[in-house]
Image: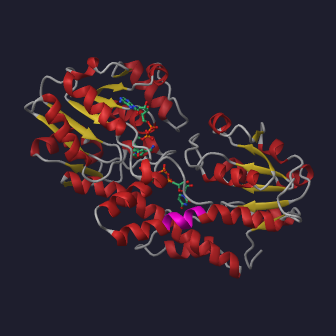
Amino acid sequence: MKISVIGTNYLGATTAAGLAEFGFDVVGVDIDEARVKVLGSGRAPLYEPGLDELLRKHTDSGRLRFTTDYREVADWAQVFFICVGTPQGAHGAADLSQVQAVVDTLAPLLTGPALVVGRSTVPVGTAAWIGRRFAERTGDLPGLEVAWQPEFLREAHAVEDTLHPDRLVFGVCSESAERTLREIFARPIDEGSPVIVTDRETAELVKAAANSFLAMKISYINALAGLCETVGADVSTLADALGHDKRIGRGSLSAGPGYGGGCLPKDLHAFTARAEELGSTELGGLLRQVDLINSARQARIVGVLAEALEGGLEGKAIAVLGAAFKAETDDIRESPALSVAELIRARGAAVTLFDPQAMENARRAFPLITYADSAVDACVGAHAVVHLTDWPQFRELDPRALREVVANPVLIDARLSLDLDAWSEAGWACHPRTAKA
Ligand SMILES: NC(=O)c1ccc[n+]([C@@H]2O[C@H](COP(=O)([O-])OP(=O)(O)OC[C@H]3O[C@@H](n4cnc5c(N)ncnc54)[C@H](O)[C@@H]3O)[C@@H](O)[C@H]2O)c1
Ligand SMILES: O=c1ccn([C@@H]2O[C@H](COP(=O)(O)OP(=O)(O)O[C@H]3O[C@H](CO)[C@@H](O)[C@H](O)[C@H]3O)[C@@H](O)[C@H]2O)c(=O)[nH]1
């Protein structure tokens, strides 16, 4: 089977490489020439563990290539996966202009049967709308069908999640579309990935509901973290204890600076907008509260920092550890680390930041922050150190050595993942405090 993947960044590049690994001939299409060139040379245009190797393997084998020209795939592929972006648009609703552009470019070029499979995250009703738009623009081409197969991969684990998905959700209108999807995903199905076959609306909703649920779990534990800070309780132990209950689970229960990234924030906003548009004010209200708790978390971290420093933040030098929205990625979209860094700067302090992978992206988007060549360099002369992205490298830092280079040994461990006993023993004032500390 010949497959085209349209849109080849975080989702699409991994999808294309994964489908080639499953044994198919794949052509990725993107309008970004620079991205297509890098991918064509077997390299990932972003930092994602294992992706470079998979891309190289299949560009070398000839099973995978990339183009900017839709004409190369229109008559060649039988299946088209849509993986373009669905960024936040007006009033939080999803901006579907990239999806619309794909339909409008592809439709006039199609001449025979095709299965178009949406993988982007979209508001419920989008697949039906795309189906109608294709029908209008192809003059009801026989054998053209639109299915929805949401993708649940996490950045930093994208390759593993693509090759061994937790579940596969097929939103289809026909048995033939289901058969095609079962054939494409035969390998993970044989390995035991559960398959849920449903209508397209349910498939679209599964994705929005899953991301909103993850955001809700994170906001719940962050709201509890605030309470724990007030009474000196330990939110990590609380989360461990909650997580042992199989009905709750430990995943997405790590308190921190709030959730960020290219998915959870925008997907929560889009789901809120769509739910309210469809009259579900209860769901809209719940999701709005989740969002409020998330933003408040970042302001609270800055408040804790300001209180920990004599005379507040004005004129102070603050070292920030981390720019990426989480570890093992160079993605800075909606990064809580950079939001906190900007809030600190807005209160009159100078920020010096280090991140193991996201420096280039951060420098481009936030030029007023100073960037250091290492975590230790970022801390030289600092009045406080704020730990905001949970890179394993930051857990290896030697608090005794760092104590020697800072102006003032104050640590805000916003990720709650450093060994605070070791830092306290080395003479640091650590926040947030627990009864233990
Ligand atoms: N990033 C993730 O981990 C992830 C995981 C699951 C689902 N998703 C969803 O997948 C979608 C894509 O996410 P992403 O993070 O890769 O987005 P992105 O914005 O990083 O990438 C979108 C890509 O599509 C390309 N593109 C835009 N218009 C195009 C067109 N008309 N034709 C061809 N290519 C075009 C862009 O050049 C870009 O390379 C979103 O809906 C997102 O919510 C993302
Ligand atoms: O216990 C936790 C878990 C995560 N986070 C933060 O939440 C954000 C999102 O993390 P994660 O879910 O690991 O990252 P993503 O790669 O954005 O993946 C989410 O978004 C993708 C795109 O839709 C989905 O496919 C995934 O299933 C979904 O987990 C990051 O800022 C994390 O630091 C926490 O603060 N505490």
| Vertical position of residue 17 compared to residue 201: above or below | above
Label count reads 0
| Residue at the far bottom in the pictured view | 231
Residue 436 seen in the current view: yes
Quadrant of the frame with the C terminus: bottom right
Q: In which quarter of the image is ligand 1?
A: top left
Q: Which of 18 and 368 is in front in this view?
A: 368
Residue drawn at 55 percent across, 36 percent down? 47
Drawn side of residue 372 relative to residue 175, left or right: right
Q: Magenta residues: mostly which secondary structure?
A: helix
Determine whether 218 is above or below 152 in the image.
below
Q: Which residue lies furthest to the front in this view?
A: 90
Residue at the image position 55 percent from the left and 67 percent from the top: 293
Q: Which residue lies furthest to the left in this view?
A: 142
Q: Is residue 232 magenta?
A: no
Position of residue 108 measured from the top left corner of the image (x, y, whole percent): 20, 24
Q: Front-most of 276 and 49?
A: 276
| Foreground residue among 8 and 48 | 8
Question: Which segment is the magenta one?
Answer: 290-295
Q: Does residue 245 appear left or right of residue 19 in this picture?
A: right
Q: Quadrant of residue 282?
A: bottom left
Quadrant where the N terminus lies? top left
Q: Where is residue 89 in the image (x, y as percent from the top left)?
A: 43, 46
Q: Where is residue 125 in the image (x, y as percent from the top left)?
A: 24, 51
Residue for point 15% across, 38% down: 145
Quarter where residue 254 is shown: bottom right
Q: Is residue 310 left or right of residue 334?
A: right
Q: Residue at x 36, y 36 (%)?
A: 98
Q: Is residue 391 visible?
A: no
